[in-house]
Amino acid sequence: MRSDPPSAEAQAPTVRDLFFTRRSASLLVLGFAGGVPYTIATVSMQGAFTSAGASEAAIGALSLLLLPYTLKVLWAPLVDALLPQRLAELGRRRAWILASQAGIAASLVGVSLVTFASGEERPLLALFFGLALCMTICSATQDVAADAYRIDISPPATRAAAASVFVMGYRLALALLGAGSLIVGGWATMKWGAAFGWGITFAGLALIMPLLALGTLFAPKPEGDQPEPSSLSSRLARSVVEPFRDLAERFGSRLVALLAFIFIFKLPDNLAIPMTLPFLQRHLGYELADIGWVRQAIGLGVTIGGALIGAMLVPRLGLRRSLFVFGIVQATSTASFAWLAMHAAAVAPDAPGIPALIIAVVIEYLGIGLVTAGFVAFLMSLCTPRYSATQYALLTAVMTLGVALAGAQSGNIFQWLLAASDGDATAAWFRFFLLCVASGAIGLALIPWVTERRFRAPRAVPPRAAP
C-alpha cells in the first residue's frame, strides 16, 4: 500500500492511483462500517422479531428506526462546528466517526443483553427499541462525518473513485451481514431459542465495530481538519447559516435549478425500482427466491463493476460529459424491463425464464453503478470543505426526498396506465417503463445549467488553526 501521489490532481489518475492507496482502503472500511448498523436495523432486527413471533405491528414499527437517516441534516451542523475534545488529535471528521462507532458498539451490546433477557415483557421491548434507536442515531451521525471525510480527503480527480469504493464497502456490508446474520440467527434460534440465539448474533455484530474502528485510526487525516478558532456559540451559528449562504453565493439564482436537478436526476430509477418486484413476481410469475439471488448476487457484482468503471471514466470525461453519458445509460437501462415485458408476451404462455431476467438485471444494475460514481462525485464537487458535512447532508436529503416522492407515486402512475390500456397489463407495464426512460430527459436538460465552470468548484477556504 503506497501513499496517494501528489500528482493525482494534475493528470488523469491511473487505476493504481484511484484504488490502491491508503485513502481508498480507508474509504472501503468506512463504507463497510456505515453499512453494518443499517443492515442490522433493516434486516437483522426484522429477523429477530420474526423468529420471536412478534406481531406484524411490532415488526412494522422497526421502520421508525430509519428516521435518523432522514433527519440527520438537522444535526449535521454540529459535526461541522464541534470537535470531540478527547479525540481532538484525530481531527473533526475522524473524531466524530470514531465516537459514533463507539456509540454503535455500545448500543449493540445493550441490544444483545436485552435480547438475552427478553420475553413477552413490554418494558424490555421498549428498551430494545430505545437502544436500537440510539444505534441508528449514532449510525446517521457516522454517515454525516464519513461523507464529509470522503469529500475532504479526495482530490477532484479521485472523487468518483472515492464514491465507488465507499459504496462498494457499504454494499458488501449489506450483502454479507444481511445474509450472514439471518443464517447465524436462524441456526442459533433453532438450537437455543430466539432470545439466546439472536442475543449471541447481536453480540457478534457488536464485536465488528471495534475492528472497523481500527480502520478509522488508520485513515489519513485531512489537512486543516479543525473547527474555527472562535467561540462555540458563534461556530454553531455560522455552521447553521454559512453552509446555505455559501451555496447561495456560489450558485446564485441557479441554486433552484441545482436542487431541482438533484431531486429529479435519478427519476428513471426512482420510478422504476419500487415497481420492479411487483412486475417480476405478479406479472411475470418469477419466484421470490429466483428474484432474490439474481438481483442480490448478480446485481451486487454488476453494481460494483459499474461503479468502478464509472470511477475510471469520470476523470477522463469530466463531470459534465459523465453526467450526460451516465444519465443516458440510466434511462436506457430502465428500458430493459420494457423489453422483458414484451419478451414475456412473445413467449407466453411460457415464463420468460431466468436468462431473460439476468439480462434485464445486469443492464439495470450496470446503470445504477455508473450513476452512483458520477452523481455522487458531482454532489461532492458542490461542497466547500469547511461546511462539507452540512452541505452534503442537505444535498442528499433533497435526493432522498426525490426517491421517496417518486416511489410513492410510481404505483399510482402504473394504475393510471393500466386503466388507459383497458386492463392490458403487458401494455401498461411496457408503457410504464418507457415513461421511466422518458423521465430521464428532464435531468439531462438541466445538466448544462448546473455544470458551468464558474459554478462548479467551491470557493477556496484556507485551513484554520486549531483553537
Image (spheres, rainbow, N blue to C red):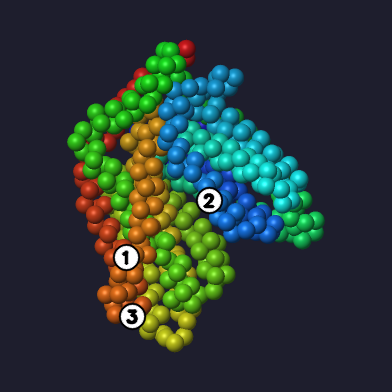
Q: Which residue is mark 1?
A: 413
On-image quarter of the N terminus = top right
- Report the residue marked by disc 3: 424
Q: Amino acid at mark 2?
A: Ser
Q: Amino acid at mark 1?
A: Ile
Q: Amino acid at mark 3?
A: Asp
Q: Is residue 218 visible?
A: no
Residue farthest along the front direction in this orientation? 122
Describe the element under mark 1 as helix, strand or loop. helix
Instruction: Please tell me whether mark 2 or mark 3 is closer to you in this view.
Output: 2
**What separation in Å lies between label 3 and label 1 (alpha carbons)?**
15 Å
Question: Which of the two residues, 175 or 48, is positioned nearer the viewer here?
Answer: 48
- Pointer 2: what residue? 63
Q: Quadrant of residue 184?
A: bottom right
User: Furthest-bottom residue in view?
Assistant: 349
10 Å crowding of disc 1: few (<14), some (14-19), many (20+) = some
State if disc 3 and disc 2 touch (CB < 8 Å).
no
Q: Mark 2 and mark 1: span between their CA atoms?
A: 25 Å
Crowd tier of the residue under label 3, counting other residues whose Cα lies within 10 Å: few below 14, some 14–19, many 20 or above? few
Q: Residue at x 38, y 57 (%)?
A: 407
Packing grade of label 2 (10 A; few <14, some 14-19, many >=20) is: few
N-terminal label among 2 and 1: 2
For marks 2 and 3, the one nearer the N-term is: 2
- Residue 113 position, x and y percent, is 73, 42
Sequence-wise, the earlier of marks 3 and 1 is 1
* Vertical side of 331 occupied by 265: above or below: above
* Vertical arrangement, residue 117 with respect to residue 268, above or below: above
